[in-house]
Amino acid sequence: MLMIEKKAAVENLESILRVKGVDMVQFGPSDYGISIGLAGQREHPAVIEAREHTIKTAIAMGVRPRAEIGSPAEAEYYLELGVKDFNLSTDTAILAAFYRDQGANLRQVVNGA
């Protein structure tokens, strides 16, 4: 499983996908955006184009693309592109949500006491 996160990786995608043993790829929009001078612009047309190119090329070459999504609602877009494998959120997002929710609960307990 490889992450496709740099401009050079997208430009050389077919060569990368031909490497024996590569059976899954995931596009990294944040790092890709940084690599092309678009930091923080995950939905910029150039980033979307690279993401869709990665997914479509992987499928055409028999390599499974995996998509990282923040909620099940985001899956439909990827399903329409042919993606069948998903990573639901990231460790940092999961931890941030946990601490936000638990911190709010703790504030209620502390302030209500």
Image: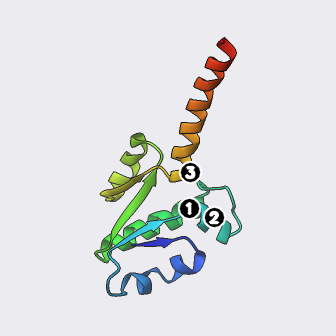
Categorize mark 2 by other alpha carbons within 10 Å: few (<14), some (14-19), many (20+).
many
Q: Residue at x 50, y 84 (%)?
A: 12
Residue placed most toward the observer, 24 or 51: 24
Where is residue 25? Give x, y as percent. Answer: 40, 70
Where is residue 4? Give x, y as percent. Answer: 50, 72
Please give left or right for residue 48 compared with residue 104 in the image. Answer: left
Q: Residue at x 65, y 56 (%)?
A: 41
**What mark, if any, has residue 67 been given in the picture?**
none
> Helix, strand, or loop for circle 3?
helix
The amino acid marked with disc number 1 is Pro
109 up-or-down from 42: above or below: above
> Helix, strand, or loop for circle 2?
helix
Where is residue 90? Give x, y as percent. Answer: 50, 52
The amino acid marked with disc number 2 is Gly
**What mark, if any, has residue 92 been given in the picture?**
3
- State which quadrant residue 58 falls in: bottom left
Which residue is the site of mark 2?
33
Q: Residue at x 66, y 12 (%)?
A: 113
Please give left or right for residue 33 compared with residue 54 in the image. Answer: right
Cα–Cα span, label 3 and label 2: 19 Å
* Sequence order check, earlier mark of 1 and 3: 1
* Sequence order check, earlier mark of 3 and 2: 2
Please give left or right for residue 62 compared with residue 25 in the image. Answer: left
Categorize mark 3 by other alpha carbons within 10 Å: few (<14), some (14-19), many (20+).
few
Q: Residue at x 57, y 81 (%)?
A: 8
Q: Which residue appears farthest toward the top when viewing the image?
A: 112
Which residue is the site of mark 1?
29
